[in-house]
Amino acid sequence: MAKMKIKIDNNIRRLRFDHNEMTQQALAKKVGASRQTINNVESGKYYPSLELAFLIAEALGSNIEEVFTHEKDKVEQ
């Protein structure tokens, strides 16, 4: 049976710059995370917890659907 795998993308970089060119450090401070965490989320190396995802969206003045998108891929097993 094929399993589904979800790929999560984000628009954090664009939204940061649309939001008065907010730095990763400034976003990190607003959400209570490290700059490295924001960098890893933004670059797709790390998927945030649901709580952090909502905090990021709120800090960017966006809803979560504007910040994070996903697509499903079938993975054959």
Image (cartoon, rainbow, N blue to C red):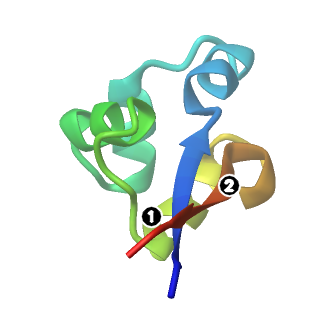
Tag 2 residue: 71
Q: What residue sits 53% from the left and 53% below the top?
A: 7
Tell me which amino acid carries mark 1: Leu
- Residue 76 x, y percent position in the rendering: 45, 69
- Residue 6 x, y percent position in the rendering: 55, 63
Q: State the separation of the CA atoms marked 1 and 2.
A: 20 Å
Q: What residue sits 25% from the left and 33% below the top?
A: 35
Mark 1 crowd level (few <14, some 14–19, many ≥20, 10 Å Cα): some
Return the residue nearer the eye: 57 or 8: 8
What kind of element bears circle 1? helix
> Picture quarter containing residue 61?
top right
What is the quadrant of the C terminus in the image? bottom left
Which label sits in the foreground, 1 or 2? 2
What label does residue 52 carry, if any?
1
Q: Is residue 37 above or below residue 14?
A: below
> Picture quarter containing residue 65?
bottom right
- Residue 22 x, y percent position in the rendering: 54, 20
> Picture quarter containing residue 28?
top left
